[in-house]
Amino acid sequence: MRAMIGIDFASFLILLVISAVVSAILHYGFKFYIVPGTASYLSKVVIGWFGAWLGSPILGHWWEGLNYQHVYFAPAILGSFGILILAIDGIKTIARVWGGATSDSQDH
């Protein structure tokens, strides 16, 4: 199995498109962000790209017909969603802890 350390430009673009779509769904569709705005969306695209890049090596190679070289689309999409949700939730949690808020003091 070849690692995805050195990828070609087409693979880079595929991962970028996956990340851009996943980021748009989370940012604009679900309003899942820390701050609104284009800069926040673009930072999600960068973080999501790494999740998409790590998706196939970590989650595996699913559906041989739905891939381009070493980019497997389903694991890349899940990897992008996963790292974005983890990053946003992690930052929100840290902000609450540092801000002194507890789950008891928040409206549910």
Image: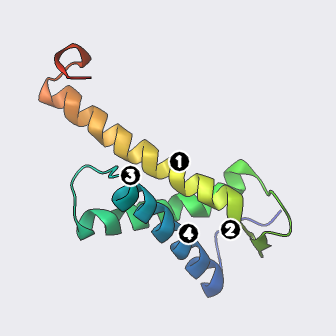
Q: Is residue 64 above or below residue 92?
A: below
**Label 3 vs 4, first from the N-terminus:** 4
Q: Amino acid at mark 2?
A: Met
Count all numbered tags in the image, as a single digit.
Answer: 4
Q: Which residue is most to the bottom?
A: 9
Give whichever of 45, 36 is nearer the camera.
Answer: 36
Q: Are marks 2 and 4 in contact (CB under 8 Å)?
A: no
Viewer-side label of 3, 2: 3
79 on left or right of 69:
left
Nearer to us of marks 3 and 1 is 3
Q: Which residue is mark 3?
A: 30
Residues marked 3 and 4 touching at CB (< 8 Å): no
- Along the viewing direction, whichever of 69 and 85 lies nearer the viewer: 85
Q: In 3D space, how far apart are the residues under numbered discs 1 and 4 (Cα atoms)?
A: 13 Å
| Gap between marks 3 and 1 measured at Cα | 15 Å
Instruction: Provide the residue designation for mark 1.
Output: 82
Pointer 2: residues within 10 angstroms few (<14), some, or many (20+)?
some
- Residue 56 lies left or right of residue 20; in this view the side is right
Q: CA distance from mark 2 to mark 1?
A: 19 Å
Q: Residue at x 65, y 77 (%)?
A: 7
Q: Residue at x 16, y 23 (%)?
A: 101
What residue did someone put label 2 on? Answer: 4
Does residue 76 appear left or right of residue 27 in this picture?
Answer: right
In percent of width and height, residue 88 lies at 35, 46
Label 1 SS: helix
Q: Is residue 45 left or right of residue 76?
A: left
Name the residue tied to disc 4. Answer: 18
Placement of 107 over or under 5, stated as above or below? above
Disc 1 residue type?
Gly
Point out the tag, 1 or 4, that comes first from the N-terminus. 4
